[in-house]
Image (cartoon, rainbow, N blue to C red):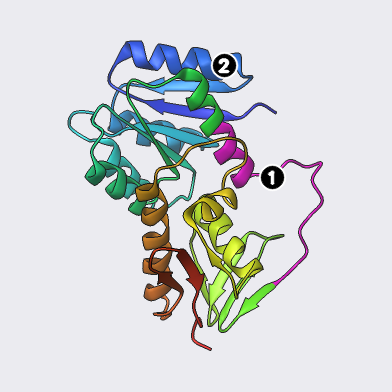
Amino acid sequence: MPHHILIADDDPHIREIICFALEKAGMKTVAVADGAAALQAIERRAPDLVVLDIGMPEMDGLEVCRRLRHTSDVPVLFLSARDEEIDRILGLEMGGDDYVTKPFSPRELVARVNVILRRARPAKAEPADDRQFLHGRLALLPASHTASFDGRPLVLTSIEFAILKGFLARPAHVLGRDMVMANAYTGNIHVADRTVDSHIRNIRAKLAAAGCTDAIETVHGVGFRLGRCGA
């Protein structure tokens, strides 16, 4: 079955470009012009991924994502006409999976969508990962795509899950930013350092809310290392 993608952007030209590129890649698309219409479309049919413009009037993409995260963990790719770090950080910390700045290459957008979809829903041909990762009071089960700390469930995006799995696979190693994102993205996808830091900050915040205050340590000038996780 083709993936179902929802695009929300107030610019009809942008909507047309994205729909054409994604449909050419074999996906089905639905496009809306504002945030309220996006939420209504999601209620009617849950998409496999949402492309959200941050700068929509009345209800912007960040507010749509904020409301969406109360009930859904559907992957979100943010779009913005502004190349500002505050947008990038807010978007990712709110639960976005990736971020593309306008003007963008349709080919790059399709590549990023495909990467997110592969992480969110692995291909059926791939063998199931039956390993169970345990470290301190942190547990992660790839087969069921579930994670918990001290028995408390963690709600992670597909990218956050993949990053955490990378740390648990090498609990004693210090991972540089390139290695952190290589664990989360496949293909030659460039991700800015600040994007990596935003994902790490978001994982730390979610684990802290579950009672883990030592999840990921920063090794200055080198990268990051898995902490004791309440051990």
Residue at 53% from the left image edge and 25% from the top image edge = 110
Foreground residue among 126 and 226: 226
Foreground residue among 111 and 29: 111
Alpha-carbon neighbours of circle 1 within 10 Å: few (<14), some, or many (≥20)?
few
Total tally of numbered discs in the picture: 2
Residue at 43% from the left image edge and 13% from the top image edge = 17
The kind of residue tagged 2 is Glu
Mark 1: which secondary structure? loop
**Residue 191 placement, left or right of 187:** left
Q: Quadrant of residue 163?
A: bottom right
Which residue does the numbered mark 2 point to in the structure image?
A: 23
In the displayed image of the protein, which residue is found farthest to the bottom?
231
Q: Which residues are magenta?
A: 113-132
Residue at 60% from the left image edge and 22% from the top image edge = 27
Foreground residue among 197 and 154: 197
Kindly report the secondary structure that dominates the magenta region of the rendered protein.
loop
Which residue does the numbered mark 1 point to in the structure image?
A: 122
In the displayed image of the protein, which residue is found farthest to the front?
221
